[in-house]
Image (cartoon, coloured by chain):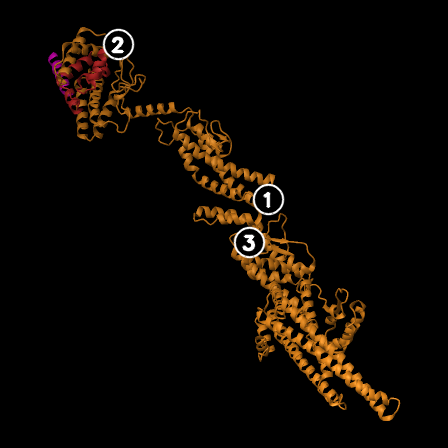
Chain colours: A orange, B red
Amino acid sequence: MDDTATVDLVRELVLRLLSSGGRSSTASNNSDAAVRYALRLLSSRMSPSVIPDELSLVESIKRRLAVSGRSSSALGFADLHSKLSARAPLLNRWALLYLLNSLSLDRHRPESSPAPGLPFLPLHLPHPPRTSASSIAGGMAGGGVFLVAKDPENIREIALREYADLFMEDNEVSESALVRDVLYACQGIDGRYVRFDRSTDGYDMPESLKVPKPTRSIVRRLCELGWLFRKVRGYISEGIVDRQFDIGTVGQAFCSSLQDELVDYYKLLTVLTSQSANPIPSAGSDSGGGAGNYLSLRRLAVWLAEPTVRMRLMAVLVDVCGELRGGAMAGAIHSHAQHGNPLVQEFMGRLLRRVCSPLFEMVRIWVLEGELEDVFAEFFILSQPVKAESLWREGYQIQSSMLPSFISPLLAQRILRTGKSINFLRVCCEDNGWVEASGEAVAHVGATTQRGGLGYGDTNALEALVVEAAKRIDRHLMDVIHKRYRFKDHCLAIKRYLLLGQGDFVKYLMDIVGPELSEPANTISSFQLAGLLETAIRASNAQYDDREILDRLKVRMMEHGDGDRGWDVFSLEYDARVPLDTVFTALNMKRYLKIFNFLWKLKRVEHALTGLWKTVKPNYINSCIFANESFGVKMQFVSVLRRLQVLWNEMNHFVTNFQYYIMFEVLEVSWAHFSDGMNSSKDLDDLLAAHDKYLYSILEKSLLGEGSQSINKTLFVLFDHILRFRSLADRWFEHIHELQHRRNKSKSKSKGELGKVGSLIDGGRKALLQFSRDFFGKMSEELDKVAKEYSAALHDFISQLPLQQHIDLKFLLFRLDFTEYYSRVSSNK
Amino acid sequence: MEATDGQIAKETLELAFQISNMLETGLDRHTLSLLIALIDRGINPEPLSAVVRELSSPSSRTQPSFAFSSSAKP
């Protein structure tokens, strides 16, 4: 296409350019090469990419000038252009302007700084295969492939594209596929690349997959959520399907609340899944985030942060609750709710409110109606089927393993007692007045009697309800026990009859029953004794007592072995019926029996001694015995009698003081304490405790407790001595009286008649002297023996007394030994 | 009207030179006249500007490309 003129022109241009470029003089072959090159360029038919529109070009030039701050030049250019178009209409003005414009742009381009931050400048890239990216600005790669890269700012784009290619090469799998897989993993499903590995117990991608390390670690971190989710879901399905009847209502509530939390989680996952369908902008392109909400791995990490925290909480709870049930489960969950993070607190609050609702319901029903609606044995109150009399003590118990930690043991005791009272009233007392009491309690507290009125956070409300209900029901129970069943009266009756409080009755009974009881035990009939009991009652003040009470008093014969006398097997008993037998249980009645036996024995000894006094007291009758005899006999008799009286006095001193101690220090004092306890007790537990204390103190103080076994034995030995003494003395006096009687008879006879009985009288006197000497000698010997044994036993008793624990026994010691006679004697020995 | 033609040409050149100065292309009159002549002959301005760019720029960029082009296959 080039004709010589053009070629010449070109040559000249080239020469000019080269020389004007300021370079050192080049060789001619250089310039030739340059010319050849120029020609080649020109013949390549490179054409501009814009339509040859002069006016628009002018406009763009003007704009460029104005924008770059040279608006005066813009005006000047417009002026020049108009002149030019007027001057040279034939000129290819567009081409000229285009040329000038491109040259000016080019001149300006290198002045601006190159695009910063690109790691790859095409200038330094030696990679031969990267033909597309290298040395593109000049467009001079050999082979004639040119890009229309007018502006070197493409460097940045080129760099990005290169980075994208590198990135693509590293990843076998696209990021969106990974995101989808992670989302599947979060729902527990295996994806194409991410699978659940049972050996490592986690989600992972196979090693063979070529994925860069950061991506691998991100994926692993996100799949932790999937692992947690698997755990929680496993527990829920197990709880609802497999152990349906095992897990109990609390467990079911827990599972259902977990499921509700998971519903929220599923919703989030659905949204994320729909977002993941948007294409992720590849690493090289520059969409700027405006092309829809795409989901990359990092964005997914941000979205899943909060659900991970919640899922972790749930998984921890699932672990903790593994095998627990009922109240224990609630307590375990509650202990994990003590957390500072408000998110955690709110979550746990929601959960606990639902989990504890069955428990609270059970408490409410128990406290207000006494019913135990516990099919799965989750409640902390256990019931056992027992007979009516042990309903209070053993019918219901607290099972502390099921007691949740937010209910204190004190509150649990109150709850137990309230329900127990209602049941007690219902069963034992056949009373229905507690219904109003419950109603009042509820109205007072303001809680509803409907289901679900109480929730987890309302422990205070629960406590208030329980306290109110307890107060009222207890009051009602006490009313019933005291008024309808006259508990106090019965206690008093027991005291009067079993504990020998009614003195005249006891005396009559002993007088009447005494001779009977001296027989061997197997010859006594209890019917007869019952009749005698009736007689005694009628003879004393007891007849004015309440018939109902007297009906309950009966005679009881205990089992007897051989050789037992009636005294050993006789006892009285009091028949306490439901509901009072809660207090007067079989064990308690046994204790009463023990005390009765002891007191009866004591009374018998006292009775014996007082009976003896009737015979030995120094009155006129006794002084008349042997009054007319010789001095020796009388002296002997008097001395023996004296010694007898002294010994009697000693025994009497002991028995009287002991009796006094028992009567006043033990029985009356304990009764006073018990009365106070009865009046101040607010509920049946208190009453039972007061009564037990009463009995226990009596047993302790009267030396019947376990710690006093040895001294008890000593005491009974003493009693035996006294009784033997009595019988001995009785026998002696029988003899003496018989002797006296015979003597008098013989004397009177001798006065009347002589002869026949004269020799008898004479012989009689001598015989009498001899006899009396023998008799009195023997008597004094025996008396000495008895005295010695008695004083030994008494010393034993007194020495053992200070060893006793109870402080009141010191008073007994004081009474017995107030002159310290015994202690001095014993220390002198 | 040759005088006017010459005059016209001179004025045209003058105007073009002023425009070129305004646009700061760095060309002088002689080069500009050559370019105008070439354009008049119908050569496309694009390769022309490429030529000018390549050959007139004193940066090192042209050096290796220069060498490159010399060793490039035709």
Residue B51 position, x and y percent, is 20, 15
**Residues behind callouts 2 and 1 on a single chain:** no
- Secondary structure under the numbered disc 2 in the rendered image: loop
Of badges 1 and 3, the one in the foreground is: 1
- Three-letter code, disc 1: Ile
Q: Residues within 10 Å of mark 3 (few under 14, many from 20)?
A: many
Q: Which residues are magenta?
A: B1-15
Q: Is residue A513 left or right of residue A74?
A: right
- Residue labelled with disc 2: B73
- Secondary structure under the numbered disc 3 in the rendered image: loop
- Three-letter code, disc 3: Leu
Q: Residues within 10 Å of mark 2 (few under 14, many from 20)?
A: few
Which chain contains the residue that carries disc 1? A
**Residues behind callouts 3 and 2 on a single chain:** no
What is the count of numbered marks?
3
Specify the principal SS of the magenta part. helix
Are discs 1 and 3 less than 8 Å apart at CB?
A: no
Nearer the N terminus, badge 1 or badge 3?
1
**Camera sees residue A89:** no
Q: Is residue A533 left or right of residue A290?
A: right
Residue A454 is marked as 3
Residue A247 is marked as 1
Spatial CA distance of label 2 from label 1 is: 86 Å
- Three-letter code, disc 2: Lys
Residue A87 position, x and y percent, is 16, 18
Q: Give A795 or A777, whichever is nearer the viewer.
A: A777
Of badges 2 and 1, the one in the foreground is: 1
Which chain contains the residue that carries disc 3? A
Spatial CA distance of label 1 from label 3 is: 23 Å
Q: Give A384 or A9, whichever is nearer the viewer.
A: A384
- Secondary structure under the numbered disc 1 in the rendered image: loop
